[in-house]
């Protein structure tokens, strides 16, 4: 790895470690708190009041109690098409994201939450959905990379997808209405398309694994850099939760989502998990993935181990994709909207297991239908990811 690249990465690592240390200290202080930070005793009583007649249900009562508890942790997600065993380096070729959650997250100097809060106040139905809900906060920094099938060519490949990359930062909120088995999620992302640092990191990874380095990043979308953004809002509902497979638990939920920005689309997903589960249902969000996973709050119950399988499917109605169509800056190669598929299907399977001391590891494989209507680029991408999650609680 070159010195110009190493220096900013080292600085970023120092900042991340300092932030994690501060978050861990805050979490230690919160462990002694009997309820969710910022929620009064009267608020807690209201959660199990007459407006939630189902609160007598032990599972529902436990969910309400979970929402009131302190929360916080970190997540590291790494995606790569090579993880799927396909031996192919193309399309969404990889991503890296580091997420942090906790009540102090919106107070960090780099947080976008003040702006997200203002946008949420104007979002359709958001004020009604947030009324009486517990809010949990998270943030994420990450990067994404996309390549055509032939990475050895320096020339523009007009029938295949263009090179593209994104370096970004996200702040997110979850408005948890556990009594109604409903969670609203919002997120605001700002980032930069087309930076050379993405190709430098991609080259470094290929040097480590001994494969050919991609040679066409000079032709990537918005080469040299262009700011971008995205706002996302979703509504998840727990549809089923019951004992199954002996002492295991089976959960199923649905999520409707809309977003505007570098990905502008609407989607609907069904996801399920089954096995030994010891985390609240709203912390399990495999459907909230747009190539890389969106940030989510980390919460665990005390005393349990987790090992469960999960699966799901999603349909997207996509109006715009900056990674294929570009933005305002001229790019060497882009696709017109008429050359793209606007209905995209996605399916996934995964497994999550406990490593100990509040740490879990997950592995998943994802399949997506083609984004490009014709030519060499008309193919169905497959990629896989590994996620490490640690709860401070």
Image (tube, rainbow, N blue to C red):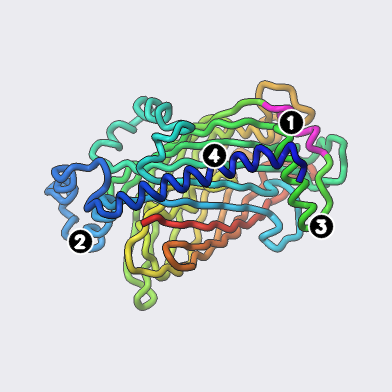
Residue 354, compared with residue 60, is above or below; it is below
Q: Nearer the viewer, mark 2 or mark 4?
A: 2
Disc 2 and disc 1: Cα gap in Å?
Answer: 54 Å
Where residue 15 appears, as percent x and y from the top left, is: 54, 40
Sequence-wise first label, 2 or 1: 2
The alpha-carbon separation of the residues under discs 4 and 1 comes to: 20 Å
The answer to whether residue 372 is seen in the rendering is no
Between circles 4 and 1, the one closer to the viewer is 1
Rendered image: mark on residue 57: 2
Front in this rendered view, residue 344 or 33 = 33
Q: Nearer the viewer, residue 58 or 160?
A: 58
In-image side of 268 versus 54 (left or right): right
Residue position for label 3? 210
Q: Mark 1: which secondary structure?
A: loop
Q: Are marks 1 and 3 in contact (CB under 8 Å)?
A: no
Left or right of residue 147, residue 182 in this image: left
Q: CA distance from mark 1 to mark 3?
A: 30 Å
Residue drawn at (41%, 50%) of the image:
24
Residue 49 placement (x, y as % from top left): 13, 49
Q: Position of residue 375 (x, y in %)?
A: 79, 42
**Location of mark 1 (residue):** 334
Q: Earlier in the sequence, mark 3 or mark 4?
A: 3
Residues drawn in magenta:
216-225
Q: Which mark is residue 317?
A: 4
User: Residue sitting at 71 percent across and 58 percent down?
Assistant: 82
Which circle's residue, 3 or 2, is located before the other in the chain?
2
Question: Would you say the residues marked 4 and 1 are in contact, meaning their CB atoms lie under 8 Å apart?
Answer: no
- Is residue 283 something that shows in the picture? yes
């Amino acid at each position: 790895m070159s010195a110009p690249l190493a220096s900013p990465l080292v600085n970023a690592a120092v900042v991340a470690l300092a932030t994690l240390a501060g978050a861990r200290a805050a979490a230690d202080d919160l462990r002694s708190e009997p309820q969710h930070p910022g929620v009064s005793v009267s608020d807690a009583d209201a959660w199990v009041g007459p407006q939630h007649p189902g609160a007598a249900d032990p599972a529902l009562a436990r969910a309400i109690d979970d929402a009131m508890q302190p929360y916080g942790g970190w997540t590291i997600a790494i995606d790569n098409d090579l993880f799927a065993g396909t031996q192919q380096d193309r399309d969404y070729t990889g991503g890296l994201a580091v997420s942090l959650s906790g009540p102090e997250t919106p107070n960090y100097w780099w947080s976008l939450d003040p702006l997200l809060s203002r946008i949420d106040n104007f979002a359709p139905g958001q004020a009604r959905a947030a009324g009486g809900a517990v809010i949990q906060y998270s943030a994420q920094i990450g990067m994404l990379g996309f390549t055509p099938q032939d990475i050895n060519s320096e020339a523009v490949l007009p029938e295949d997808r263009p090179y593209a990359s994104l370096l970004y930062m996200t702040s997110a909120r979850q408005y948890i209405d556990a009594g109604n088995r409903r969670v609203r999620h919002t997120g605001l992302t700002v980032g930069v398309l087309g930076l050379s640092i993405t190709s430098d990191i991609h080259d470094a990874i290929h040097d480590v694994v001994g494969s050919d380095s991609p040679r066409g990043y000079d032709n990537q979308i918005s080469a040299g850099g262009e700011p971008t953004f995205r706002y996302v809002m979703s509504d998840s509902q727990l549809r089923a939760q019951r004992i199954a497979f002996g002492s295991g638990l089976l959960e199923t939920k649905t999520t409707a989502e809309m977003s505007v920005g570098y990905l502008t689309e609407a989607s609907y997903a069904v996801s399920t998990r089954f096995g030994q589960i010891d985390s609240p249902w709203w912390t399990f969000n495999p459907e909230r993935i747009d190539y890389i996973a969106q940030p989510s709050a980390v919460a665990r119950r005390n005393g349990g181990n987790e090992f469960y399988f999960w699966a799901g499917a999603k349909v997207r109605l996509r109006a715009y994709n900056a990674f294929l169509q570009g933005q305002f800056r001229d790019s060497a190669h882009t696709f017109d909207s008429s050359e793209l598929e606007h209905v995209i299907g996605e399916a996934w399977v995964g497994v999550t297991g406990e490593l100990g001391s509040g740490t879990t590891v997950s592995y998943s494989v994802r399949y997506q239908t083609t984004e490009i209507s014709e030519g060499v680029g008309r193919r169905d991408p497959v990629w896989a990811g590994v996620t490490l999650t640690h709860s401070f609680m």
